[in-house]
Amino acid sequence: MRIFNFSAGPAVLPEQVLHRAAEEMLDWHGSGMSVMEMSHRGKEFIGIADKAQADLRTLLAIPDNYKVLFLQGGAMAENALIPMNLLGKKTGADYINTGEWSKKSIKEAKKYCAVHVAASAEDKNFTYVPPQDSWKLNQDAAYVHVCTNETIGGVEYHWVPQTGEVPLVADMSSHILSRAVDVARYGVIYGGAQKNIGPAGLTLVIVRDDLLGQALPITPSAFNWKEQADNDSMLNTPPTYSIYIAGLVFEWLLAEGGIAAMEKKNIAKAALLYDYLDQTGFYSNPVAPGDRSRMNIPFKLKDESLNEAFLKGAQKNDMVQLKGHRAVGGMRASIYNAMPLEGVQALVAYMKEFERTNG
């Protein structure tokens, strides 16, 4: 029996994708072998990777002057690899601090460059996105880094920052493919796959051509974007099975109507939960309404002594992974693309019943 899995990542995958992967597990398209067993340089897998990239380009309307890289290491590794690949002859970069993942990016980047925090939401416990007019940007920065959806705090950018000639770099791990994105407004978009793309193990990097070739000498070859781009992400063995599953997810998204259709569904799902949170005093969400995430919705019970009872009751009703991150506590519902509307409806119904019996 399938349950409603509200995990922040690794997260729920489309059921159709899982069925397809199961059907093809032992024999991919008559090849007599599993994708897990294929050489990454064989024609079968190269075909899988090429189609995955083509479908992703279609979904996000990625311009021709951007490279798509399928790498390993997760967004955490990219926090180090971004300064390694983008600094060139410069020594510093601007970072916007909107929460736990921004802080991790800043901490890692400080090992390789001078980090200037151009704006921070720490003054209000990371419950909003600092407005652009409060940013103190340095025009000599190698790049400006933002985390456009904070998975832990539930804060999301609903606008694109203006950074002039300085490249804008965005960690979109937890909301990529959930909404329309004008890729051309960014120098680099990156993210771990384990939320809206596929299983853990794959990292996506979309990088503008003119930003390649600036890597520091210390950059490992496997993490040098230029070297990987020149080798179609196969300088070393890529995460082949994760790429295959991502490709199936891209096919599913296209069949569902693409990003525009998915964004419409995501708006409806998020509105259902936020509307309830806003009309009850039993639960609360701390994020400024204009900056609320559609993907990750944190909330707290007014009486936190009821937390364990809430989680146990949710599990009995086939809803799991609702416990909030240890950094902020409370609860969190992650409602990525593959979470059906029925899952959010079930959660709201349970929350109402829990409030009725414990309020």
Image (spheres, rainbow, N blue to C red):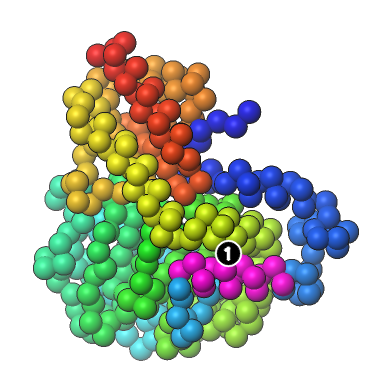
Local secondary structure at mark 1? loop
135 on left or right of 255: left
| Residue at the far top in the pictured view | 357
Quadrant in which residue 334 is drawn = top left
Image vertical order of residue 148 relative to residue 84, above or below: above
Q: Which residue is mark 1?
A: 72
Rendered residue at 61%/67% (across/down): 52
Q: Nearer the viewer, residue 165 or 214?
A: 165
**54 drawn magenta:** yes
Quadrant in which residue 348 is drawn = top left
Quadrant housing the N terminus: top right
**3 drawn magenta:** no
Is disc 1 surrounded by few (<14), some (14 to 19) or many (20+) residues within 10 Å? Answer: many
Residue 351 lies, in percent from the top left, at: 34, 23
Q: Nearer the viewer, residue 213 or 58?
A: 58
Residue 359 lies, in percent from the top left, at: 24, 14
The residue range painted magenta reads 47-60
Rendered residue at 59%/79% (across/down): 228
Residue 24 lies, in percent from the top left, at: 77, 52
Q: Is residue 71 visible?
A: yes
Rendered residue at 60%/60% (across/down): 251
37 on left or right of 68: right
Q: Is residue 75 visible?
A: no
95 on left or right of 6: left
Rendered residue at 43%/28% (across/down): 346
What is the chief secondary structure element of the magenta stretch? helix
Q: Amino acid at mark 1?
A: Gln
| Residue at the far left in the pictured view | 133
Image vertical order of residue 225 relative to residue 128, above or below: below
Residue 6 lies, in percent from the top left, at: 46, 37
